[in-house]
Amino acid sequence: MTIDQQDDVGPVPVFSGPVPHIRHVAVDRPWHWLQLGMADLGAAWRVSLTYGALIAAFSLALTLLVAGSGHVMLMLPLTAGFTLVAPLIAVGLYATSRDIAAGRAPDLGRALRAWQVNPLQVGFLGVLLLLLHLFWVRVATLMYALFFSELSPTLDTLVTTLFQSGASLPFLIVGTAVGAGFAAVAFAVSVVSIPMLLDRRTNAFTAMATSIMAVRVNLPAMALWAFIIVFLTMVGIATLFVGLVFTLPLIGHASWHAYKDLVTEQ
């Protein structure tokens, strides 16, 4: 075969399956996702609330462990960073909503094994979110050291140090802005990517690109959705994680419906 000759093999597609497309949705669409999530929560309340209770118990145990270790100043960034990894934690809830839509009976064991549907890609994206969370904790720790002289506060003095000292307001403003930046990145790359990896045989990069495009195309609606997620998560955490038993399943089920509403193949 000469250099000018070509074989008869046809063109090779870039993607192995249908290319995902993003639907445009109304600004108030997140409220509809919440309604659908509430319906799934009611249909699978045993599985959903048990799943939420397991996550809440683990979160409380981790918080107590950090407090008992003497690294009290890590409690705030670890807690605030919960939203960074929540999409990964909720993978079993996505699977439960998928089961309900398919007419299958919800099952806790299947929910806990949901990541095994696409383990390498879910695991890869999970590692990225965990690294982002750890990086946020590191940045928050450095900011604390820059603003406050007391580097090892006790649990009793933490609130006073953070909210009643001269540096409190600048620290809270800067910390909130930086934390919001981390949260925005995590939200953009994961809001539909992990449900997509559960639903389709695709890779993490395609899923993240789809997620970013979903946010870009529907920025007002997704901003509202991000606010709702953060609000419900903070309510759950503020009740010493007891509220997460309910709010986390609600967010998880609603997030599945957000994905199905936003992403289509044509």
Image (cartoon, rainbow, N blue to C red):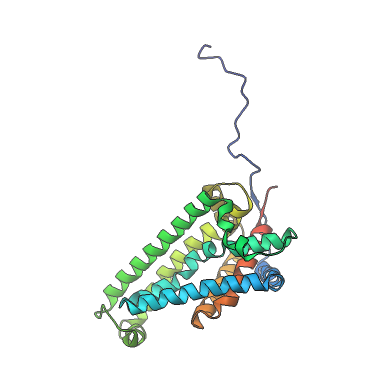
Among all residues in the image, which is located at the extreme front?
109
Left or right of residue 170: residue 188? right
Q: Where is residue 54 in the image (x, y as percent from the top left)?
A: 53, 72
Determine which quarter of the picture holds residue 172.
bottom left
Determine which quarter of the picture holds residue 47.
bottom right
Left or right of residue 87: residue 68? left
- Residue at (43%, 61%) from the top-left corner? 130
Q: Which one is nearer the viewer's eye here, 63 or 231?
A: 63
User: As displayed, is residue 203 above or below residue 256?
Assistant: above
Among all residues in the image, which is located at the extreme top?
2
In this rendering, does residue 258 appear at all?
no
Q: Which one is nearer the viewer's eye here, 165 or 129?
A: 129
Among all residues in the image, which is located at the extreme left?
149
Q: Where is residue 93 in the image (x, y as percent from the top left)?
A: 61, 65
User: As displayed, is residue 210 above or below residue 34?
Assistant: above
- Residue at (63%, 60%) from the top-left corner? 95
Q: Where is residue 197 in the image (x, y as percent from the top left)?
A: 58, 52
In this rendering, does residue 193 appear at all?
yes
Q: Which one is nearer the viewer's eye here, 68 or 177?
A: 68
Q: Position of residue 82 (x, y in %)?
A: 47, 70
